[in-house]
C-alpha cells in the first residue's frame, strides 16, 4: 500500500513536499488524447478491489452523512468506510484534495467535490470516469448530471444541489411594519432601517453573506454581478467583468460594508459563521444555502430564531431579479485507492434516492431527485423547497474551466481588495478582467 495515512495531521505534514510537486507538475489534462481517454474508460470498466475505504468531505454538521456511513458499515463488516473530515473552507478542502492526488496517495478513496471542481479533477486524471450504467442519471435533475460530467463523460455522482436563499426575521419585519420580504437591495436596506430602529433590534446588523477571501467570496461576487444583470463569463467562456452591470454588483457590496449594513467582521465569514450569527439573533437578513435550515429550526435550545424566520429568493439589484449561483456537490472515486469496487458501490448506495430521502430527516441539503423536491410529505417538512426551485431556475453556474483554481483565486483577490478598500471597485474589476483574460488565453 502507498502512504496509508488516516491522520489529517500527517497529511498536512506533507505540505512542503507537495508544494514542490505542484511547482514541477503541469496540468496537462486539458490536452488529453483519445488514447488516454480510452485508457481511463478501461480503468472505469475495471473497478476492482474490495476492503476498507475512506470518505473525504467537509464537516458533517447535521450528522446525516454519518448516519448513511453507519448504515453501510453495519451491512459491510469487511468494507468499512472511515470519514476523514476536511476544513470548512472550500479552498482548503480543494488544496488538500489536490495535494493528495499530486503525490498519488491512496489515503483518500471517495472524494466529496464542489461541482465546479469536476472539470479540473477530471482533466488532471485525479478522479475516475464512472461506468455509464453506474447511476440512475435519468431520474436526476439534468443540471446536476451535467455538473458531474466532463467532455460528455460522467465523472461524479450527484450528491446534492444548491441554490442561494435569503433568510429573514419575520418577527422583526412584522414589528417594524414591513409586510413582505425584500425583492431587491433597495427594499432590504429600507426594511433594515425600520427594523434596526426597534429596541429589540439593538446591537443587530442588517445583512451578511460570505466574504472571506475564499471560494464563498467567488460565489457571493458572482451572485451580485448576476443580480445586477451581468455575468462573469459569457456563453463563449470570455470574461466579462469590465461592464456597468459588474460594477453595479460589486459597488453594492462595497457600499454595504462602508455604510455598516454588513457588519465589519463579516469580511471573515464563511457559511458557518453566517449561520451562527443569524441563529444567535445578530442579523436581520442572511444569504446562505439550504443546509442551514435544520440548524435554524432546531428545538434543542441551540437556535434563537425558531419560528421567527422566513425564506425568500436572494434580492436583485435595481430592477433585476436576484440570481443565485448554482451550488452542490458530487462524489468521485480516486484512481489511487486500492478498493475501487467498494468505493463505487458505496457511492451508488450513498447517492441513491432512498438514502437521499433518509438524510432529509436531519439535513436540509437539497436532493438531486426531482421526485423528492416535489414529494408532498417532503415539502411539508421543507416548505422552502418551492422557493429553492425558484432559486435554481434563475441560478447561474460558476465558470466551468479546467483552471478553476487560478480563476477563482483571481476573482477572490480582486473582489476582496474592493471590499476592504484596498482598491476602488473600478480598479478591482479592471485588474480582474486582465487576469481572467490572461488565464483564458493559456
Image: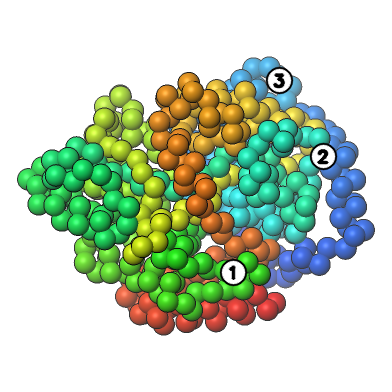
Q: Position of residue 158 (x, y in %)?
A: 64, 40
The local secondary structure at tag 1 comes to loop
> Is residue 191 toward the left or the right of residue 311 in the image?
left
Mark nearer the N terminus (2 vs 1): 2
In terms of depth relative to the viewer, which is nearer, 350 or 140? 140
Query: CA–CA distance between discs 1 and 3?
Result: 47 Å
Colour approach in the figure: rainbow
**In this rendering, is residue 70 above or below 131?**
above
Residue at 60% x, 37% y is 368
Would residue 306 be seen by someone viewing this image from the given angle?
yes
In terms of depth relative to the viewer, which is nearer, 435 or 126? 435
**Circle number at residue 131:** 2
Q: Which residue is mark 3?
A: 76
Residue at 84% x, 37% y is 47
Q: Which residue is mark 1?
A: 234
**In this rendering, is residue 51 above or below 415?**
above
Q: Quadrant of residue 435?
A: bottom right
Mark nearer the N terminus (1 vs 3): 3
Other residues around mark 2 within 10 Å, as few (<14) / some (14–19) / many (≥20): some
Indicate the quadrant containing the N terminus: top left, top right, bottom left or bottom right.
top right
Query: CA–CA distance between discs 3 and 2?
Result: 22 Å
Q: Please say if the residues under marks 2 and 1 sit with CB atoms less than 8 Å apart.
A: no
Q: Position of residue 251 (x, y in %)?
A: 34, 71
> Which one is in front in this view, the residue at disc 1 or the one at disc 3?
1
> Is residue 387 toward the left or the right of residue 343 in the image?
left
> Which one is in front in this view, the residue at disc 3 or the one at disc 2?
2
**In this rendering, is residue 32 above or below 203?**
below
> Is residue 126 toward the left or the right of residue 412 in the image?
right
Residue at 87% x, 47% y is 41
Amino acid at each position: 500500500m502507498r502512504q496509508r495515512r488516516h491522520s489529517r495531521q500527517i497529511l498536512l505534514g506533507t505540505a512542503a513536499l507537495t508544494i514542490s510537486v505542484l511547482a514541477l507538475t503541469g496540468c496537462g489534462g486539458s490536452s488529453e488524447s483519445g488514447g488516454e481517454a480510452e485508457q481511463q474508460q478501461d480503468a472505469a470498466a475495471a473497478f476492482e478491489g474490495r476492503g476498507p475505504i475512506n470518505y473525504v468531505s467537509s464537516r458533517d454538521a447535521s450528522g446525516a452523512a454519518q448516519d448513511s456511513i453507519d448504515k453501510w458499515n453495519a451491512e459491510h463488516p469487511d468494507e468499512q468506510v472511515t470519514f476523514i473530515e476536511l476544513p470548512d473552507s472550500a479552498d482548503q478542502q480543494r488544496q488538500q484534495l489536490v495535494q493528495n492526488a499530486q503525490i498519488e496517495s491512496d489515503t483518500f478513496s471517495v472524494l466529496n467535490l464542489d461541482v465546479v471542481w469536476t472539470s479540473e479533477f477530471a482533466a488532471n486524471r485525479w478522479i475516475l470516469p464512472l461506468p455509464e450504467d453506474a447511476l440512475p442519471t435519468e431520474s436526476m435533475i439534468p443540471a446536476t448530471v451535467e455538473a458531474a460530467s466532463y467532455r460528455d463523460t460522467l465523472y461524479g455522482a450527484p450528491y446534492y444541489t444548491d441554490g442561494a436563499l435569503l433568510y429573514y426575521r419575520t418577527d422583526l419585519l412584522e414589528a417594524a411594519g414591513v409586510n413582505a420580504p425584500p425583492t431587491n437591495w433597495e427594499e432590504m436596506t429600507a426594511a433594515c432601517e425600520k427594523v434596526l430602529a426597534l429596541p429589540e433590534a439593538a446591537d443587530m446588523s442588517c445583512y451578511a453573506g460570505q466574504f472571506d477571501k475564499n471560494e464563498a467570496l467567488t460565489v457571493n461576487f458572482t451572485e451580485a454581478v448576476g443580480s445586477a444583470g451581468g455575468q462573469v463569463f459569457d456563453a463563449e467562456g470570455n470574461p466579462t467583468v469590465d461592464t456597468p452591470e459588474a460594477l453595479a454588483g460589486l459597488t453594492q457590496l462595497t457600499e454595504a460594508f462602508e455604510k455598516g449594513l454588513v457588519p465589519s467582521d463579516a469580511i471573515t465569514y464563511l457559511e458557518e459563521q453566517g449561520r451562527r450569527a443569524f441563529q444567535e439573533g445578530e442579523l436581520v437578513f442572511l444569504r446562505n444555502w439550504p443546509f442551514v435550515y435544520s440548524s435554524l429550526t432546531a428545538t434543542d435550545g441551540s437556535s434563537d430564531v425558531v419560528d421567527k424566520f422566513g425564506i425568500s429568493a436572494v434580492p436583485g439589484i435595481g430592477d433585476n431579479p436576484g440570481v443565485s449561483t448554482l451550488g452542490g456537490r458530487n462524489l468521485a472515486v480516486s484512481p489511487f485507492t486500492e478498493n475501487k469496487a467498494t468505493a463505487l458501490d458505496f457511492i451508488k448506495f450513498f447517492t441513491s434516492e432512498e438514502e437521499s430521502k433518509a438524510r432529509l430527516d436531519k439535513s436540509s441539503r437539497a436532493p438531486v431527485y426531482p421526485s423528492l423536491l416535489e414529494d408532498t410529505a417532503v415539502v411539508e417538512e421543507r416548505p422552502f423547497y418551492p422557493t429553492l426551485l425558484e432559486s435554481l431556475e434563475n441560478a447561474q453556474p460558476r465558470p466551468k474551466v479546467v483552471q478553476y483554481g487560478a480563476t477563482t483565486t483571481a476573482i477572490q483577490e480582486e473582489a476582496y481588495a474592493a471590499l476592504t478598500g484596498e482598491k476602488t471597485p473600478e480598479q478591482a474589476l479592471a485588474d480582474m478582467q486582465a487576469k481572467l483574460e490572461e488565464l483564458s488565453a493559456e
